[in-house]
Image: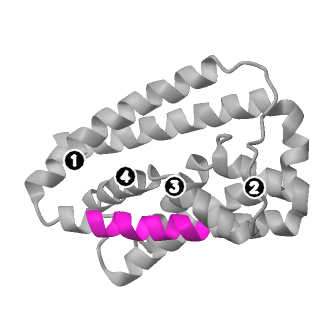
């Protein structure tokens, strides 16, 4: 029980930061807000958050299955170590090479805002390995167990962190639009720093 606040804060932060860089989901949240009003933008964000929670549930089930084999955990941690290292470099380079250009909103068909958010989030399958890997690292560090309350908190934290990022795009996009390059660059640097932190945590777990 003592690790629950730490689990929520770390998971919330990881989900929020991962959802910040301009992409299909948050830009469509902003687009929905501009075209249909902020209320519809928020509803779109809720759809995205719900889909992410479903994906996180699947990720937890995968991580739990893998956790029964210690050798598999070590192999996955080694794989995660390489992935975090590569992603840290990729995000840093993206931030360094960010060009000054306006954010481009993706054209989509008119449809119910909530269902559109769910659909677009579900086709983003990268969320499953991301949260499965995060779950495995947290479990190896003792931050998370596979008790029901831990799993529920982990899932709620990913949904909450994702929704906050969508909400900020809906509410403040007009203020950010003219500073798109700076915002995108800073987001990539933040993500690079997060990957470095996860790399250090994973390396410590492997070699100690």
Measured as percent of width and height from the top left, residue 66 is found at 19, 61
Marks 3,4: beta carbons within 8 A: no
> For residue 148, which numbered disc appears in the image?
none
How far is mark 1 from mark 4, CA to CA? 11 Å
Question: Which one is earlier in the sequence, the residue at label 2 or at label 4?
Answer: 2
How far is mark 3 from mark 2, CA to CA? 16 Å
Q: Magenta residues: mostly which secondary structure?
A: helix
Q: How is the image coloured?
A: one colour
Q: Locate residue 51 relative to residue 80 in the image: left or right.
A: right
- Crowding around mark 3 (Cα neighbors within 10 Å: few <14, some 14 to 19, many 20+) is few
How far is mark 2 from mark 4, CA to CA? 29 Å
Extent of the magenta region: 48-62
Residue topped by disc 4: 129
Q: Is residue 160 visible?
A: no
Measured as percent of width and height from the top left, residue 20 is found at 65, 46
Question: Which one is earlier in the sequence, the residue at label 3 or at label 1?
Answer: 1
Q: Nearer the viewer, residue 202 or 83?
A: 83
Question: Which one is earlier in the sequence, the residue at label 3 or at label 2?
Answer: 2
> For residue 123, which numbered disc appears in the image?
3
Residue drawn at x 41%, y 51% as measured from the top left: 130
Q: Is residue 38 visible?
A: yes
Please say if 93 is above or below 88.
above
The quadrant in which the C terminus is found is: top left
Residue topped by disc 2: 109
Residue topped by disc 1: 76
């Amino acid at each position: 029980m003592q690790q629950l606040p730490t689990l929520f804060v770390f998971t919330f932060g990881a989900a929020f930061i991962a959802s910040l860089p301009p992409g299909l989901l948050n830009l469509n949240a902003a687009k929905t807000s501009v075209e249909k009003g902020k209320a519809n933008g928020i509803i779109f964000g809720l759809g995205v958050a719900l889909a992410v929670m479903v994906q996180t549930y699947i990720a937890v089930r995968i991580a739990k299955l893998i956790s029964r084999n210690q050798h598999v955990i070590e192999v996955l941690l080694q794989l995660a170590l390489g992935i975090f290292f590569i992603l840290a470099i990729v995000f840093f380079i993206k931030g360094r090479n960010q060009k000054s250009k306006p954010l481009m909103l993706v054209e989509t068909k008119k449809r119910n805002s909530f269902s559109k958010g769910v659909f677009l989030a579900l086709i983003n399958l990268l969320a499953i390995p991301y949260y499965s890997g995060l779950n495995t690292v947290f479990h190896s560090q003792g931050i998370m167990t596979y008790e029901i309350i831990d799993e529920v908190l982990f899932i709620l934290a990913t949904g909450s962190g994702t929704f906050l990022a969508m909400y900020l795009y809906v509410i403040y996009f007009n203020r950010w639009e003219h500073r798109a390059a700076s915002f995108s660059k800073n987001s990539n640097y933040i993500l690079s720093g997060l990957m470095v932190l996860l790399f250090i945590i994973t390396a410590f777990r492997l070699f100690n």
